[in-house]
């Protein structure tokens, strides 16, 4: 039997640490969902509903929900209000991450973040590129921490929201919250 290499040992140790950290994360993370749109309402907000349903189906809470216009002050105010609520651990926005003149979610969020998680946007665009090709460059999805609350911005597209939820958010949400609580 071959002895493990140094890199195999380090990988095993790192994997164990990651698994331990992930297991220490809270179950049932409490989330607020903000849909940013000039045209959506509760009846036709399919992306907001998709996010809520996915979170709940995976054992998390989505007790806070709001639709705001793509106006910087409405976006900022909603994020500030939800982040000031001790019950909210994660804020997920959808909409306003593109490059049109009315897309201001990214600009508002990065202006208030205490710490940015650039890997979220990078990974999301990479996964999106694999699914849809070069249009993935048009999103400015990002994430970070504001007021001890995780904030993640998603495009308004239902398919994009599902990709982010299934491939990044649901697998890591408890781990992210654990890290912020440390």
Image: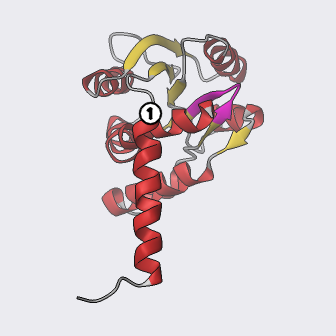
In magenta stretch: residue 89: no
User: Does 41 appear above or below 147?
Assistant: above
Is 6 situated left or right of 130 in this image?
A: right
Q: Quadrant of the N terminus?
A: bottom left
Instruction: Give the crowd class for mark 1: few <14, some 14-19, many >=20 residues within 10 Å.
Output: many
Q: In the picture, residue 143 is in which quadrant?
A: top right
Is 140 situated left or right of 4 in this image?
A: right
| Pointer 1 residue | 156
Seen from this angle, which residue lies furthest bottom? 2
Is 65 situated left or right of 144 in this image?
A: left
| Pick the front one: 105 or 88 | 88
- Mark 1 lies on a secondary structure that is loop
Q: Position of residue 108 (x, y in %)?
A: 71, 31
Residue 155 visible in the picture: no
In magenta stretch: residue 149: yes
Count of labels shown?
Answer: 1
User: Does 46 appear above or below 110?
Assistant: above
Q: Position of residue 165 (x, y in %)?
A: 36, 38
Q: Position of residue 104 (x, y in %)?
A: 65, 33
Q: Position of residue 37 (x, y in %)?
A: 51, 23
Q: Quadrant of the C terminus?
A: top right
| Residue beneath the point at 47% across and 39% down | 175
Secondary structure mainly formed by the magenta segment: strand
Q: Which residues are magenta?
A: 145-151
Residue 176 visible in the picture: yes
| Pick the front one: 45 or 13 | 13
| Residue beneath the point at 60% across and 41% down | 100
């Amino acid at each position: 039997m071959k002895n493990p290499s140094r890199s195999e040992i380090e990988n095993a140790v790192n994997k164990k640490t990651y698994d331990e950290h992930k297991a220490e994360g809270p179950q049932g993370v409490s989330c607020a969902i903000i849909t940013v749109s000039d045209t959506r309402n509760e009846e036709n907000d399919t992306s907001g509903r998709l996010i809520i349903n996915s979170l709940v189906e995976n054992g998390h809470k989505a007790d806070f929900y709001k639709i705001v216009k793509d106006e910087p002050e409405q976006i900022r105010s909603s994020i500030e209000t939800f982040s000031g609520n001790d019950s909210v651990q994660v804020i997920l926005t959808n909409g306003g991450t593109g490059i049109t003149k009315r897309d201001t979610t990214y600009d508002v969020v990065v202006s208030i973040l205490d710490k940015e998680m650039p890997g979220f946007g990078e990974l999301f665009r990479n996964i999106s590129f694999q699914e849809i090709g070069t249009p993935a460059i048009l999103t400015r999805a990002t994430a970070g921490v504001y007021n001890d609350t995780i904030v993640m911005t998603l495009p308004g597209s239902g398919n994009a929201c599902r990709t982010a939820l299934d491939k990044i958010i649901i697998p890591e949400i408890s781990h992210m919250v654990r890290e912020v609580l440390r």
